[in-house]
Image: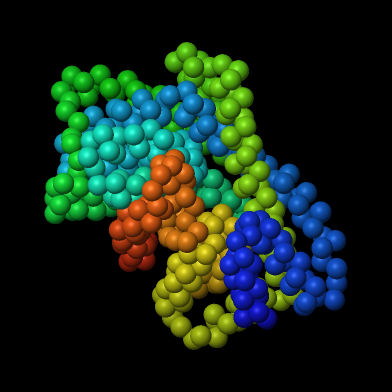
Amino acid sequence: MLANASLLLAILIGASLPIAATLIICALLLSAIYSPLPLFLAASEIFWKVSTEFTLTSVPLFILLGEILLRAGIAERMYGAVALWLNRLPGGLLHANIGASTLFAATSGSSVATAATIGTVALPEVRRRGYNERLFLGSLAAGGTLGILIPPSIHLIIYGMITNTSVPKLYLAAAIPGLLLAALFSLIIVVICMAKPGFGGEPIKATWRQRFTSLVDLVPILLLFLVVIGSIYAGFATPTEAASLGLVFAVVLAWWYGKLSLALLHESFIGAMKATAMIMLIVLASYFLNFVLSVIGLSQQLTSFISGLGLSPLQTMLVIIAFFVVLGCFLESLSMLVTITPLVAPIVIGLGYDPIWFGVILTILLELALITPPVGINLYVVQAIRGRGSIQDVIAGSLIFVVSMFALIGLLLAFPAIAMWLPTHYGD
């Protein structure tokens, strides 16, 4: 059954069907083949229960927040300020791509939104200043992945809902690894640009006066971060309520900069609705597929298979990591999260690993899926913004940053306290 289900999923993905359609068709076919009961009759109840989940309300709110920041020009101001402060590092604007992505990730919760926003602002500079285009594109795609790791992450919210894990503790656990991953990205850029100085392009010249003046443009993003994350840890807002507070603050910022208009709101709502519809359809389809897999016994079969390997907890964890790496080449990160987590999380927790720690590991693996071909969605986002050339350039530039993700996973396996120190000391 496990082999047949995997083969069926591979065939549907290979047919280039939309991910949500693939999951629904897979669920219906497995139900028809392996269950004597008409499981499709339960679909409406599952869809209603999931779609009315209060936690998921934060998803469209965070997406809309990012849309407003982009269209109000706040992201562009932020990028300019970060570029002035990081211009002395080997690689110049390549570090600005990573730094701006880190800051924007701390407000948007979405990798796609982060890659699209920073890419839109940064790409005009790639030829103007003579950067190696592949490395520049790769830094945008990789930097964008930080959107699902650095709080407030939409994926961590969904993981917390699936595993019944505290979202505030997940946010605390992801904070240090998120910043560490950004530092590792920049370290790779430094090494490459020192080895090949021509990759670093023409540096931006700035005086200290200009740098300090530019700090004003960082204040809105930092205040927004404090509103969203601060309200959660101050104890007067849930993640969903914090998302709504952040959205209101983003509207106020747009008004403050004189950008607030009906046209801006209309475009922001349209963009947010399109992204939300895609995400929610994948989530609903994944929950229905999980229901079918559970009823026909495939979930239990997978658990028995892994347990029957007779491996140590660390070896089992390495097998699971390898499984996600391979799967990430063929599945979109959100569908992986919602489809595979209910199957794998009980196994990992049964091995004695903390679900909060595993949430961070899993999110890094999902980040990896965003930049690994052929389905890495951030690759296509950056290429769409670029609007010319081949996507092979984006893929080639992104693969070097995969090294940073594997290095971080290795560090978390060796030193779990990197993720667990904050939730252990400040999570209560």
Residue 198: x and y in percent read 16, 46
For the point 18% across and 36% down, the residue is 202
Q: Relative to 259, is 162 on the left or the right? A: right
**Is residue 50 shown left or right of residue 126?**
right
Name the residue nearer the viewer: 414 or 282. 282
Task: Tell me: 119 left or right of 279.
Answer: left
What residue is rendered at 28% in x and 50% in y?
A: 135
Residue 382 visible from this viewpoint: no
**Location of residue 128 in the rendering, given as x and y in whole percent from the top left corner:** 26, 34
Residue at horizontal 68 percent and vertical 58 percent from the top: 21
Is residue 293 found left or right of 78 in the rendered image? right
Q: Position of residue 152 (x, y in %)?
A: 49, 41
277 and 316: which is toward the camera:
277
Q: Above or below — where is 217 with respect to 351? A: above
Seen in the picture, residue 352 relative to 200 is either above or below; the reply is below
| Residue at 66% across, 47% down | 280
The vertical placement of 268 against 392, above or below, is: above
Q: Residue furthest front?
A: 389
Q: Is residue 35 visible to us here? A: yes
Q: Quadrant of residue 272?
A: top right
* Residue 232 x %, y %: 52, 36
Q: Looking at the image, how many numbered discs can be counted on the residues?
A: 0
* Position of the N terminus by quadrant: bottom right
